[in-house]
Image (cartoon, rainbow, N blue to C red):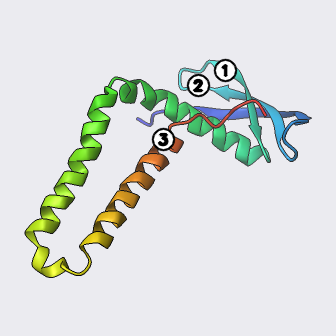
Amino acid sequence: MKKTKAKAINAILRKESNTFKGYLKYEVTIQNEDGTTELIPAYGKDLQDALSRVVHDRKIEKILPVVNKIPDLVWVLGWFLALALVVIYINSQIHLYKEYVGMIYIGFIALTATLTLTLTNFFTLRNKNK
């Protein structure tokens, strides 16, 4: 048996944003999995952008309670553990990477910082009043 998904059944353009040029406000009627409907304001450059923001926010609202249960200390320890594992690995293989050790360390720190910022950006809500 196929599980029904939430779907947009109606979208109405309400107005253009005065604050952010090029953004539009839509009112989207969504039919939930259980058959109920809800009216959600959606903001974006076009209807597809607005709907993608609504879908993103609904995914984040499901994931965020689980992520928020993990204490910040665990995230920090995980970050340092990843750095420590790279240092241990590179030091065990130092004869192969002797000339590039500094660049490898800096590159991995940059990669880890980029990954951290990307995940932080992913977990922000997109459907904000524009």
Quadrant in which the N terminus is drawn: top left
Of pointers 1 and 3, the one earlier in the residue sequence: 1
Measured as percent of width and height from the top left, residue 118 is found at: 48, 49
Measured as percent of width and height from the top left, residue 44 is found at: 76, 42
| Distance from Cα at disc 1 to Cα at disc 3 | 31 Å
Q: Which residue bears the numbered disc 1?
A: 37
C-beta proximity under 8 Å, tags 2 and 1: yes
Residue 79 in view in this figure: yes
- Name the image quarter holding residue 17: top right
Of pointers 2 and 1, the one earlier in the residue sequence: 2
User: Left of 93 or right of it: where is 100?
Assistant: right
User: Left of 128 or right of it: where is 98?
Assistant: left
Mark sitting on residue 120 = 3
User: Left of 20 or right of it: where is 114?
Assistant: left
Three-letter amino acid code of the residue under disc 2: Asn
Three-letter amino acid code of the residue under disc 3: Thr
The residue nearer to you, when weighing 124 against 91, is 91
Q: Residue at x 29, y 30 (%)?
A: 73
Q: Which residue bears the numbered disc 2?
A: 32
Residue 5 in view in this figure: no
| Distance from Cα at disc 2 to Cα at disc 3 | 28 Å
User: Left of 16 or right of it: where is 9?
Assistant: left
Measured as percent of width and height from the top left, residue 34 is found at: 54, 20
Residue found at the very far left of the displayed protein: 92
Q: Residues within 10 Å of mark 1 (few under 14, many from 20)?
A: some
